[in-house]
Amino acid sequence: MFPKLKSAVAALALTSVFAGAAAARDLVINFDDLNPGPKKGFEDAVAKFKEENPDINVIVNINDREAHKTAIRNFLTADAPDVTSWYPGNRMAPFVEAGLFTPVTDLWQDNGFKEDLAAIMPTMSRDGEIWGVPYSYYQWGIYYRKDIFDILELEEPQTWDELLAACGKMKEQGVTPFTIGTKFLWTAAGVFDYINLRTNGYDVHNALTAGEIAYTDDRIRATFANWEQLIEECGFVDNHASMSWQDALAPFANGDAAMYVMGNFAVDGMKNAGLTEEQIDFFPFPVINADIPPAEEAPADAFFIPTNAKNKDDARKFLAFVARPDVQSEWNTTIGQLPINSKAEVGESKFLQEGFELLNGAEGLAQFYDRDAPAEMAKAGMEGFQRFMTDPSALEEILTRLDEVQAQVYE
């Protein structure tokens, strides 16, 4: 009898193994950043989630941001993952309106997110619902080569005139003041946003991206006049329209250019290009109009659940995990950005500390031009910004075109 009993027990155990395997559930997550720091931050978070949830089989697809932007509408429609990274604000609006994202308002209510993530809730909301969970945000500003500034005996400019004067000293020594790569357009939008925020303020900037002010409005013309002054008296590296933002790190790293209007995520790329933290520093975009309270660029990154997801229960579990303060603390320390959860800890990096102080003192936080404006307007706007940077004489044609697109988009 014993051998038979032993065989029965073994068979039962084998059956249990197969039953456990069958019970494992696939959770497919699409992520949008192949850069080393963000990729590691995401993969570390997924590893922690898998450790806490061994019954979930997590499958990740990681692509670069530009490819992700191109593919997202297709995969949301045809072969949706269970979770996808995307952006709050107007960038999520087309997918919300097309019924391709699932609301997660109850997830926020049940987990206390409305308190812990309060700073970002307005830009995650639309039509009375909340549509995703953010895991990170970051400041924009001017990153600069501190060692070059020290050699040239330059201080961090606090005003527009001080910035222009500093540019003059750089050019005298053969240093191009600004690097940039506008091949993928959005970097030019960052420059536009800051000049407009400093020229006209947060309310006017929001009114523009909401379609309430024309691009030919005198206030927006003033923004472009300041931008043209920056191009003429400071200047950007040659051939920037053929370079990505990563390509533009090369002249910054080799000392040909001294400043970069960019988000804090670029610090990782600067270090990977061979610079030490002692060689890099940061200052807020200078004041243009002293009567205008300072607003800052602080884009957020988030996760959403597609309507066509197959495993929404575990997708919701992942979004709840992403919002936790301990997860956001670790994740953002790795990627060099700021956690959104108010109970999370800010990393010790000087850039994070400066960014935290900057954003906490801001009068308003803009998401970014291509997130604050509808997608069609953003595309036309950024094409116009890039063209203006290469040919300021085309301003009238650019502004007229943007007014025409605006009339179509916001009708």
Image (cartoon, grey):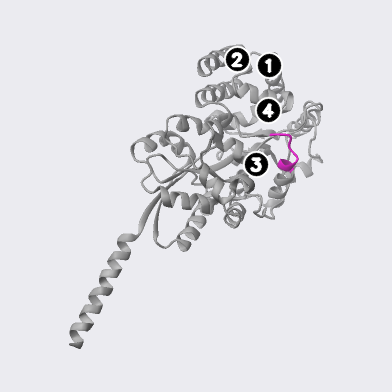
Foreground disc of the pair 2, 3: 3
Is tag 3's residue or tag 4's residue first in the polypeptide sequence? 3
Q: CA distance from mark 4 to mark 2?
A: 22 Å
Under circle 1, the secondary element is: helix
Q: What separation in Å lies between label 3 and label 1 (alpha carbons)?
A: 32 Å
Disc nearer the start of the sequence (4/1): 1
Spatial CA span between label 2 and label 1: 9 Å
- The residue segment tinted magenta is 358-364
For the point 80% across and 30% down, which residue is it?
A: 165
**SS of the residue under disc 3:** helix
Q: Earlier in the sequence, mark 4 or mark 2?
A: 4
Identify residue for label 3: 119
Residue 45 bears which disc, if any?
none
Residue 388 location in percent, x, y? 60, 20
Q: Is residue 107 visible?
A: yes
Query: Measured from the top left, where is residue 135 in percent x and y?
Result: 57, 47
- Amino acid type at circle 1 is Arg
Q: Residue furthest bottom?
A: 2
Residue under pointer 2: 399
Q: Earlier in the sequence, mark 2 or mark 1?
A: 1
Q: Secondary structure at mark 4?
A: loop
Left or right: residue 377 versus residue 279 is left
- Image side of residue 357 versus residue 66, left or right: right
Kindly report the distance in space between the C-alpha atoms of the residues bearing marks 4 and 1: 19 Å
Magenta stretch contains residue 360 = yes
- Magenta stretch: includes residue 203: no
Residue 15 horizontal/vertical position (percent) = 25, 69
Nearer to us: label 4 or label 2: 2
Location of mark 1 (residue): 221
Nearest the camera: 311 or 272? 311
Residue type indicated by callout 2: Leu
Position of 94 with respect to 362 (left or right) is left
